[in-house]
Image: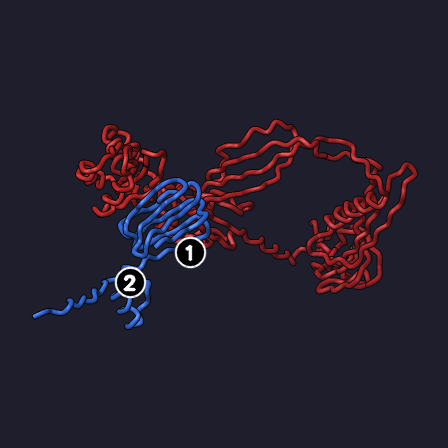
Chain colours: A red, B blue
Amino acid sequence: MIWQSFFGYVMIRLDGRGLERFLNKVLQAGIPVWNVRRESAQCMHAELRAKDFARLRPLLRTGRCRVHIIKRRGVPFLLARFSKRKALVVGGAACFLLLLFAQTRVWRIQIEGVDAVPLAVVTRALEQANVKVGMPRKAVDALSVGNAIRSYDKGIAWAGVDMDGVILHVRVVEAQPLPQAQDTSTPSDVIAVKDGIIEKVSALCGKAHVKAGDAVRAGDVLIRGDITREGAAQELLVCAQGQVEALVWYVATVEKAPRTLALVPTGNTCPYRKVLLAGHTLYQSHVPFDECEVEVLEDTRFTGAVLPVRQVYGVCRELREAYVVIEAPEEQMAQALYQAEMEALIKVPQSARIVEKQSEAIMLEEGGVRVTVRVCAREQIGVQRPIRTAAYLD
Amino acid sequence: MRKGPKKKRKRIRPRAFARKLHEALDLPLEIAPHVSKVTMLGQQDLLVENHRGVLQCGKEQVRLLTNDGVLGVQGKALELRELSDSRAYVRGEIESIVCKA
């Protein structure tokens, strides 16, 4: 049917008698027909090529039926119709060509991953690599541009460039700052920054003031920089250095009441639709709720097309603040335990290793529950502090 | 001189000869031009190849002339989806197919 539409075909109505005889004459003349349907005793519909319609005339002379054209379909008829509207055809063709040209260019540069490094640094790196909005997509060499960005600033550890339709994505990974070189000329002590129980002391310079098993508080001296011998005429001060490992306890307590305020669904829903173009929201359906949550049912991305379009379709459920009664004490305890654990673990630094975890739950008289979680972590607690003596200050 | 009765010459029918030639050469009958081929797909589509014309075309009955006789197709909402000098494609709710010599 698509093939016939390309060359044009007509739908005809045959009226009269001897319709089958006429059909056989048409077949003998080598004219193919299709969609032949009997409408009534003396009426039949059929379809044939537009160029074959003229060949029916001599066959009709000898027959007892008449032919009428009902519809004309196909590209030739469409072109004939549009021949009277040249401006529309030219405008449509121009738009199509403009769209073809537009999709070969870069129209947006999206930079991700920058935090400490200023965005202007990455932008200047891109300018230096001759990457800008409006340049041809094929001219972007992802590997070389990524290397150029990485080598432009020491704060950038890695840079990746990716072309997504007409958007150029630049992903940057920042370099971790180097540890500051320690000033070994200033006499200093190593003191504790947190309370803990000493596990191991390794004094590289200075004299250890504590030993394994000692309990220390924040501010206590762990390694002394004053190594003056007793009876010496001149004091000897050094910059104490070393590693002091200790067990530190982090505690978090959470109390849960019998009922708690939470967002609960009301049962009201409405359809939700959102259309994004290159990350920007073009259209978002109106949501008549103050608080709601969206359940995404379908997320369609049209990547690689002329323009990057994304459509999100889902259901929006209304939420309302309400007191939720937690019936079972076990559920209260579980929620409180989970919350306390999260709060305690957040306090533990990333460099620490968790050794032990303890939890304690108490049922309150008024029906709630109190849960305490203690987390023990092994970590370095020593930090240098300059020794402030009168001689030194002079 | 009295002449005897004329001997009737045996007339060789072209179709019978073609069929015998096909069988002698072990050729498949499908490629024979005089043999009508009927292919049915499910209960909605029927393709008749090597037909010789349309005898009747209606919504409940379509009759086609073949080399072996008349092929009748009964059903509902029948239509000739495609019709050319050698192929006829019938579509609709086909209930029965009758071949009459």
Instruction: Specify whether A321 is left or right of A12.
Output: right
Element type at mark 2: loop
Residue ID at (77%, 63%) = A201
Q: Could you say which is closer to the camera, residue A340 or residue A1?
A: A1
For the question of whether residue A184 can be seen, the reply is yes
The quarter of the image holding the N terminus of chain A is top left
Q: Give the total of numbered labels.
A: 2
**Badge 2: chain ID:** B
Report crowding for label 1: few under 14, some 14 to 19, many 20 or more residues within 10 A (C-alpha). few
Element type at mark 1: helix
Q: From the viewer's perspective, is residue A158 above or below residue B10?
A: above
Place of residue A394 in the rendered image (x, y in percent of width and height, measured from the top left): 69, 49
Q: Which residue appears farthest toward the left when viewing the image?
A: B1
Which amino acid is tagged 1?
A: Leu
Which amino acid is tagged 2?
A: Ala
Residue ID at (28%, 48%) = B53
Q: Which residue appears farthest toward the right when viewing the image?
A: A365
How far apart in space, not on screen, are marks 1 and 2 (Cα)?
A: 65 Å
Q: From the viewer's perspective, is residue B89 above or below residue A224?
A: above
Q: Which residue is mark 2?
A: B32
Q: From the viewer's perspective, is residue A186 above or below residue A132?
A: below
Q: Could you say which is closer to the camera, residue A10 or residue A301?
A: A10
Q: Could you say which is closer to the camera, residue A162 or residue A120?
A: A162
Q: Which residue is mark 1?
A: A143
